[in-house]
Image (spheres, helix red, strand yellow):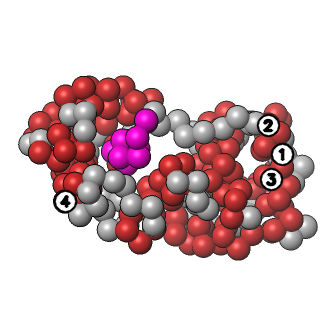
């Protein structure tokens, strides 16, 4: 089985296993997803979803958050960890959205990567979830599962994993597949415990299982 054939089989099986998948960060506007994904670095999505409620209650718009003192933002987002750097990036990002983009979130990879605190993972999430464009979000679940399954060979750098996946995954499938990697990574192919291969829908095609 080629890597492309393997990818198509993985997509089909995970679609069946997790028919309803989506981003686990709560948001009702593109700029809020930008804020949440920055806060999610080294923090759980569940905690971020709680913290941003207080943030948006005090600063409900891009303009309000852009005008806020960084120290005040930090006081609210501190439970997410790395409070100072995250608050600084959020403040600078909102200022740029206000001053450069007229209060809208840009819809190209190049423009998104210009925003403070936005890397390829965050930009891909915005591209896929907000704008419905082809996207591959190489978070820790995606990287772990792709290596275990055999879609990539011992590659850990997010940008390199993304590059290899673009070669074998149909563009329209990338975003949802990465959400399903999160679903599967949390439920079955876990990081902190031995993966539950006995209940995995991919066990007969997975490189990790063959090596056991």
Q: Magenta-highlighted stretch: main secondary structure? A: helix
Tag nearer the camera, 3 or 4: 4
Q: Position of residue 111 (x, y in %)?
A: 37, 68
Whether the magenta-drawn stretch holds residue 28 is answered as yes
Judge the density around disc 4: few (<14), some (14-19), many (≥20) Cα neighbours within 10 Å.
Answer: few
- Which residue is drawn at the image coordinates 45% and 29% (left, top)? 46
> What residue sits right under mark 2 in the picture?
17
Tag nearer the camera, 4 or 1: 4
> Camera-side residue: 100 or 210?
100
Q: Could you tell me how far apart the alpha carbons at marks 2 and 3 are, in whole angstroms?
A: 10 Å
Image quarter where the N terminus lies is bottom right
Q: Could you tell me how far apart the alpha carbons at marks 2 and 1 are, in whole angstroms?
A: 6 Å
In this view, 80 is above or below 161: above
User: In the displayed structure, does residue 82 sit left or right of residue 50?
Assistant: left
N-terminal-most mark, 4 or 1: 1
Judge the density around disc 2: few (<14), some (14-19), many (≥20) Cα neighbours within 10 Å.
Answer: some
Q: Could you tell me how far apart the alpha carbons at marks 4 and 1 are, in whole angstroms?
A: 45 Å
> What residue sits right under mark 3 in the picture?
10
Q: Position of residue 12 (x, y in %)?
A: 83, 49
> What residue sits right under mark 1 in the picture?
13
Q: Position of residue 176 (x, y in %)?
A: 66, 49
Verify CB contact (< 8 Å) between mark 1 and mark 3: yes
Judge the density around disc 1: few (<14), some (14-19), many (≥20) Cα neighbours within 10 Å.
Answer: some
- Which residue is drawn at the image coordinates 20% and 34% (left, top)? 59
Residue lying at the far front in this picture: please name it.
102
Q: Could you tell me how far apart the alpha carbons at marks 1 and 3 are, in whole angstroms?
A: 5 Å
User: In the image, which residues are magenta?
Assistant: 27-37
Q: Could you tell me how far apart the alpha carbons at marks 2 and 4 are, in whole angstroms?
A: 44 Å
- Which residue is drawn at the image coordinates 76% and 36% (left, top)? 19
Verify CB contact (< 8 Å) between mark 2 and mark 3: no
> What residue sits right under mark 4 in the picture?
99
């Amino acid at each position: 089985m080629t890597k492309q054939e393997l990818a198509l089989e993985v997509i089909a099986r995970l679609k069946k296993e997790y028919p309803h998948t989506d981003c686990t960060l709560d948001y009702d506007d593109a700029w809020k997803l930008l804020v949440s994904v920055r806060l999610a670095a080294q923090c759980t999505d569940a905690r971020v979803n709680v913290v941003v409620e207080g943030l948006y209650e005090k600063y409900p718009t891009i303009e309000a958050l852009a005008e806020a003192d960084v120290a005040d933002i930090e006081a609210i987002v501190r439970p997410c960890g790395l409070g100072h750097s995250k608050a600084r990036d959020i403040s600078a990002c909102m200022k740029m959205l206000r001053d450069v983009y007229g209060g809208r979130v840009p819809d190209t990879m190049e423009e998104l990567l210009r925003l403070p605190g936005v890397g390829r993972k965050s930009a891909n999430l915005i591209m896929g979830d907000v704008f419905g464009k082809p996207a591959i979000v190489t978070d820790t679940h995606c990287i772990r599962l792709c290596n275990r399954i055999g879609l990539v060979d011992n590659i850990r750098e997010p940008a390199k994993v993304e590059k290899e996946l673009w070669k074998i995954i149909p563009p329209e499938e990338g975003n949802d597949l990465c959400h399903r990697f999160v679903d599967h990574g949390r439920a079955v192919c876990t990081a902190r415990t031995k993966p539950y291969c006995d209940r995995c829908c991919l066990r007969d095609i997975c490189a990790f299982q063959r090596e056991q």
